[in-house]
Image (cartoon, helix red, strand yellow):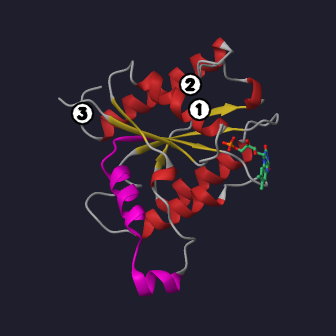
Amino acid sequence: MRPPRIVTFAGSIRTGSFSAALAALAARELALMECEPVLLSLADYPMPIYDGDLEAEEGVPEAARKLRDQLARADGVFLVTPEYNAGLPPLLKNAIDWASRAKGEGDPFKGPVYAIGSTSPGGLGGYRASMSLRQTLALGLNSLVLAEQVMVAGAAGAFDSDGGFKDGRALERLRAVLTTLIEQAALRAGLRA
Ligand SMILES: Cc1cc2nc3c(=O)[nH]c(=O)nc-3n(C[C@H](O)[C@H](O)[C@H](O)COP(=O)(O)O)c2cc1C
């Protein structure tokens, strides 16, 4: 029986991104669990801003098709968002919107189970963006999204120099969410957890 394939990526490509740090830490933790972890960066999937005219004239960009295929091949996805003006950053929303337009094998949003992470240097840990992401995935794209999520507040001081969490409870929370994600992804994909 193959292990569940768990894709992780962040909605930021900023150097020193806290969301990318959480996605990288999640991939590191996943590597210690019974799954096949895949860490992606949206830097490798550059796309123009979605425009219906552009789509009609040129079709869906190659990067969007590739991202869509990565998601469609996943059994679970841990998606980490930063918060911009109480909502999703355009980089992430744009990537999701384009990926939802691309056709191919499998279903990138109804196939895998999703778990949400969010970060913010502020006190709310990107809670509002996480709700926005939940709405887009669950209501917009019919994704199954775990109730459990990871929110990292005070993100500028949350990580140590090795990329781990300074707070042991935060690591426990991340591990618990990833464990549930693997279990649910395996169940959904008909794999043994
Ligand atoms: C346009 C913009 C709007 C922002 N709005 C919020 C916000 O509503 N809430 C919040 O906690 N942080 C907000 N921030 C701060 C981001 O959380 C911060 O820049 C964070 O480092 C971005 O995520 P990253 O580290 O993953 O790149 C905003 C930043 C930008 C550039």
Q: Which residue is mark 1?
A: 22
Q: What is the quadrant of the C terminus in the image? A: top left
User: Is residue 174 visible to us here?
Assistant: yes
Q: Which mark is residue 174?
A: 2
Please tell me whether mark 3 sits on a helix, a strand or a loop. loop
Q: Is residue 45 magenta?
A: no
Please tell me whether mark 2 sits on a helix, a strand or a loop. helix
Q: Position of residue 192 (x, y in %)?
A: 24, 27
What residue span does the magenta drawing correspond to? 52-77
Q: Is residue 59 magenta?
A: yes
Question: Which callout, 2 or 1, points at the residue further toward the start of the chain?
Answer: 1
Is 131 placed left or right of 111 in the picture?
right
Identity, as a three-letter code, of the amino acid under mark 1: Leu
Tell me the residue at 62%/39% (across/down).
19
Magenta-drawn stretch, dominant element (helix, strand or loop): helix
Identity, as a three-letter code, of the amino acid under mark 3: Leu
Question: Which callout, 2 or 3, points at the residue further toward the start of the chain?
Answer: 2
Q: CA distance from mark 3 to mark 1?
A: 27 Å
- Mark 2: give few (<14), some (14-19) or many (20+) Cα within 10 Å: many
Tell me the residue at 73%/31% (across/down).
155
